[in-house]
Amino acid sequence: MVPPPSPSVYRTKAHRVRQRSLIALAGLGLVLAGYGLGRWQDTPAPAVASPVAVPSSLPPSSSAPSAPPTSEAPTPTVYPRLEAEAADQLTGIEAQPTEDEGGGQNVGWIADGDQLRIDGVDFGPVAATKLDVRVASDAEGGRMEIRLDGADRPAIGTLNVTRTGGWQKWRTDQVDIAPTTGKHTVFLVFVRNDGSEFLNLNWLQLVH
């Protein structure tokens, strides 16, 4: 008969089995820990909601005054001289060579009831308030009335004629007129109490 193994042999084998079991369990624990760590790293982070802009229902503040609209001032018109002999219509008036500076012609033999018409005179956006008139006369009395858009309209200004020293002795007189803007037909209407001639006229020029 084979003698039974000694108790120390059983203890040694059991010790080895326990060691192997512990090693296997430790390895399994490491594997499970690694798997759990991997799953944790792969799990996406929870989404963070971005703030949503909420439109304001409040009206804009009215405490600050709004800037007034800007507008440029109109530019005054530079008025040309209006030559009397170049008028669109002469009634009872004739042109003649002039001895005034610059030469050319003037109109003369002006008497009561005569008229001169100039079409399309542009007074511009800034009102004209005066009229320069180049005149010569060897008579006293009579007047030249400035009218707009009709020979029978009220006068906007009147030149009272006085002697200049001769029919070719020229002088520039200035007449106040009602402030006028825009385009108009200008009528010069000559008035005297008798039928005698009383004025020669060379040119006109509006003034602001």
Image (tube, helix red, strand yellow):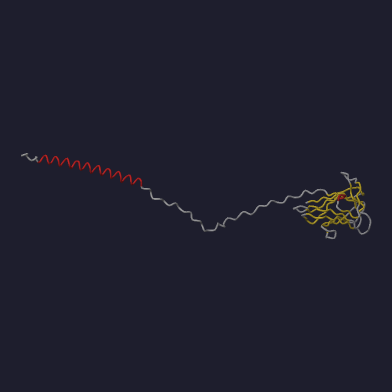
Location of residue 21 by image quarter: top left
Question: In which quadrant will I find the N terminus?
Answer: top left
Residue 2 location, x and y as percent?
A: 7, 39
Total number of numbered discs in the rendering:
0
Res. 113 image quadrant: bottom right
| Residue located farthest toward the front when viewing the structure as drawn | 1
Quadrant of res 32: top left
Q: Nearer the viewer, residue 117 or 15?
A: 15
Q: Position of residue 185 (x, y in %)?
A: 82, 55
Report the front residue among 185 and 72: 185
- Residue 93, position in %: x, y? 91, 53
Give percent across and percent down for residue 76. Answer: 75, 50
Q: Does 47 sit left or right of 145 as displayed?
A: left
Relative vertical location of residue 8 with respect to residue 48 in this rendering, above or below: above
